Image (cartoon, rainbow, N blue to C red):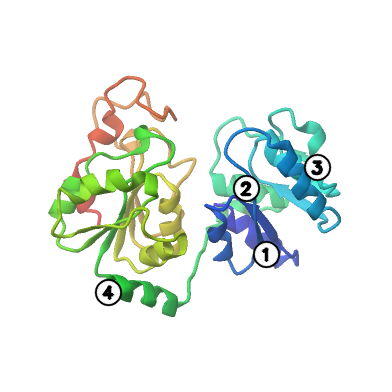
């Protein structure tokens, strides 16, 4: 979702270095407009002052502007410590003094692509669409290693880092109904979830969760005939590659994080006029269903999703 911002900056002549945590850094190495990527040596949680100060000393004097994408205090701390002259970001977490150019946070949750692209200071943000590409030979090499043919298999991404309220529970039932091979993708933490799905259709499912690099997962998505996912990072990867996809939304909202892909089909019972009783609780943006019924995803049938593939 940050790719359109980087494309805008590149188009106006800015040389781009992206600082990212190691698990997401490969995403930026796949973007041709990015000149360099710095793997941040930070852990989740805490300011880690010593590590940030040490990295700031290495970066000092090398950059003219920093675009601070996350809204956290610690994300704005590094550009400040590195004395980068112009530091652009949204207000939040008492970081007024850390930024030199501050945008107000919208009251309502906007589409995230436009939210990030606004840091460029340009207009026409509603036209922005993320784009990713891999050399065809790289995709073919990964598919050959897995014994797969382009367009002849379906990728399922059943995980969602945020929590259970974003995870559709019927991937296994859908896999049993398909007549194509199914490749299950996700992180190592999602390997057990994917294995439970694969066990429901062992004759056609291949569990690769935690067994691929991020770029290999990209290649498998780029070569797929279709992708079924929750509202997750891999959903946006599928959108950026422009592959046919079905995106399942429950506690979150496609008005906020839609798959920006003309070939995407979104399922969100909140917007279904034929669904009753109406989901007045959605979107709740909770990690687990606060009402305990989980209707927003439980009631999306595998038959419905199969009809969209």
Q: Are marks 1 and 3 in contact (CB under 8 Å)?
A: no
Note whether residue 261 is visible.
no
The residue to which callout 4 is attached is 149
Quarter residue 153 falls in: bottom left
Element assignment for label 2: helix
The image's mark for residue 36 is 1
Of the two numbered discs 4 and 1 on the same chain, state the one appearing first in sequence. Answer: 1
Q: Residues within 10 Å of mark 3 (few under 14, many from 20)?
A: many
Q: Residues within 10 Å of mark 4 (few under 14, many from 20)?
A: few
Q: Is residue 86 above or below residue 295?
A: below
Of the two numbered discs 4 and 2 on the same chain, state the one appearing first in sequence. Answer: 2
The residue to which callout 3 is attached is 80
Q: Are marks 4 and 2 in contact (CB under 8 Å)?
A: no
Q: Residues within 10 Å of mark 1 (few under 14, many from 20)?
A: few
Q: Are marks 4 and 1 in contact (CB under 8 Å)?
A: no
Of the two numbered discs 1 and 3 on the same chain, state the one appearing first in sequence. Answer: 1
* Nearest to viewer (mark 4 / mark 1): 1
Note whether residue 176 is visible.
yes
The residue to which callout 2 is attached is 116
């Amino acid at each position: 979702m940050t790719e359109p911002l980087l494309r805008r900056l590149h188009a106006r002549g800015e040389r781009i270095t992206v600082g990212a945590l190691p698990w997401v850094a490969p995403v930026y190495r796949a973007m041709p407009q990015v000149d360099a990527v710095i793997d941040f040596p930070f852990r989740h949680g805490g300011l880690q002052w010593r590590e940030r100060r040490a990295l700031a000393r290495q970066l000092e004097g090398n950059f003219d502007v920093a675009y601070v994408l996350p809204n956290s205090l610690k994300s704005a701390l590094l550009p400040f410590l590195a004395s980068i002259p112009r530091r652009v970001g949204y207000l939040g977490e008492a970081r007024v003094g850390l930024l030199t150019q501050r945008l107000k946070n919208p009251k309502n949750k906007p589409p995230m692509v436009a939210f990030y692209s606004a840091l460029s200071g340009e207009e026409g943000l509603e036209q922005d669409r993320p784009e990713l590409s891999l050399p065809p030979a790289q995709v073919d090499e990964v598919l050959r290693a897995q014994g797969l043919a382009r367009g002849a298999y379906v990728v399922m991404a059943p995980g969602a880092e945020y929590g259970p309220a974003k995870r559709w529970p019927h991937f296994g039932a859908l896999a049993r109904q398909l007549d194509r091979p199914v490749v299950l993708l996700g992180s190592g933490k999602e390997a057990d979830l994917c294995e439970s799905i694969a066990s429901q259709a062992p004759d056609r499912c291949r569990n690769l969760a935690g067994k691929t690099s991020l770029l290999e997962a990209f290649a498998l998505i780029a070569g797929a005939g279709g992708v079924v996912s929750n509202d997750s990072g891999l959903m946006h990867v599928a959108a950026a590659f422009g592959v046919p996809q079905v995106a399942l939304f429950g506690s979150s909202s496609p008005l906020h994080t839609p798959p920006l892909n003309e070939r995407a089909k979104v399922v969100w019972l909140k917007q279904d006029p034929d669904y009753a009783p109406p989901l007045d609780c959605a979107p709740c943006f909770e990690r687990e269903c606060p009402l305990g019924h989980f209707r927003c995803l439980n009631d999306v049938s595998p038959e419905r999703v199969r009809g969209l593939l």
